[in-house]
Amino acid sequence: VPVGTKGSIKSLPPNFIKEIGIQLAFVNTYHLVTHPGVEVIAKAGGIHKYAKLDIPLMSDSGGFQVFSLATQHKGEEVPYVVKISDDGVKFRSVFDGEMLELTPEKSIEYQMKIGADMMMAFDECVPYGSNYDYSKKAMDRTHEWLKRCIVKVRRWKIGMEAGQENRIKKLEKPPTSKHPLPNSFLNLPSNSQFLYGIIQGGIYEDLRKKSAQFVASCDVDGVAIGGVAVGEGKKEMRDEVKWVAPYLPKDKPVHLLGVGEIDDIFDLVKYGVDTFDCVEPTRKARMGGIFQSQKHNSKVKSLISEIDIHRGIYRNDLSPVDENCECWVCQNFTKSYLHHLFKQRELLGYTLATYHNLWVMERFFDRIREMIKNNII
Ligand SMILES: [Zn+2]
């Protein structure tokens, strides 16, 4: 799931999304709430229309930025948390200092207005190193908040929220091409937005298992694993997923929040994770880290390596950007040209590198899906 934090997959024009084969992208509620604000996005008909992101979209609850980043990286660039309570969290926007509030209900309302297809329940993500008692408290709070998110989504869907009476009436008469839906209707969020509950529990096995059992027992459309890869080592991170694997529902999608390095993905798919969001392919692309696909018969784990296109050895290298890749970039451009663009800080370099890295990622996942189908993993 490529990350389009602020409503854009950085440097990638949206018309390339389908060509690359991207099926789902991720947007961050916290960023969109602080700028441009959810009201204008809702008025535009949701983020799909506003940003021309014509594929299913997943949003987070906003909690991760507020809780986790704020406590881990103290500084000017992070939200300033004013108060955390059982009701929610109050914080100041990094953008303009405005006082904002996130509660389970607010988070769902924001995500509904953004128009995301897959929404995350509001959760408390504890920083790495949190002790058992605090991790348990945050987990219990996350569970209580999940119940409130479910109620909020239900109320919204059956039209119990204020101002939706007209919408219900319109729904009784299905729209036809002769009588299309009025604009005011289109401005309202879609009725087919789905909710994921989030498993928390820090680094503690019994808490993780308890949380997984609780979330799986709730009336949610999908299950997400949160609070991993927040500073712990790779083994610990993988253990956190392994512990909950037996409790993950077989009939619902499972998402792992914020993890997506190549070697992690391959191992974690085995535990039942279906989707991953991570900035890795796009961030690396912008830093000149160009994925190199290995031959089809290579081991899947080492299917992708990486080169730094800034290196002088590529200045006169007229071979394709990636010799084993069939993407539009590799059919048309050389390592030398990409090296030149990056050295000269030409903006096209970021676009070409992002296109290629995401293409390689998609083919990696094609391969994984094939292996699952053939019972190889
Ligand atoms: Zn390519």
Image: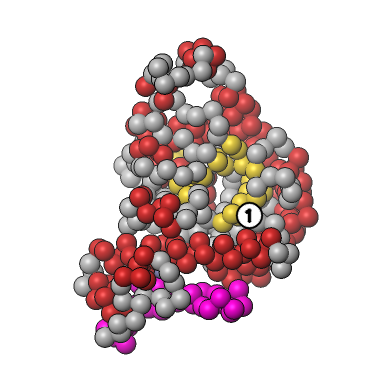
In what quadrant of the picture does the C terminus appear?
bottom right
Residue located at (36% from left, 75% from top): 321
In the depicted structure, whether residue 14 falls above or below residue 49: below
Say which quarter of the image contains residue 145.
top right
In the depicted structure, whether residue 194 falls above or below residue 168: below
Q: Mark 1 points at which residue?
A: 274
Residue located at (22% from left, 67% from top): 346
Q: Where is residue 292 in the image (x, y as percent from the top left)?
A: 45, 76
Residue 32 visible in the shown view: yes
Instruction: Identify the amino acid type marked 1.
Output: Asp
Q: Is mark 1 on a helix, strand or loop?
A: loop
- The answer to if 298 sits in the magenta stretch is yes
Q: Position of residue 300 (x, y in %)?
A: 60, 73
Q: How crowded is mark 1: few (under 14 residues within 10 Å), some or many (20 or more)?
A: some
Q: Give the range drawn in magenta.
A: 288-315
Residue 92 visible in the shown view: no
Q: Which colour scheme is used?
A: secondary structure
Image-quarter location of ligand 1: bottom left
Residue located at (51% from left, 78% from top): 294
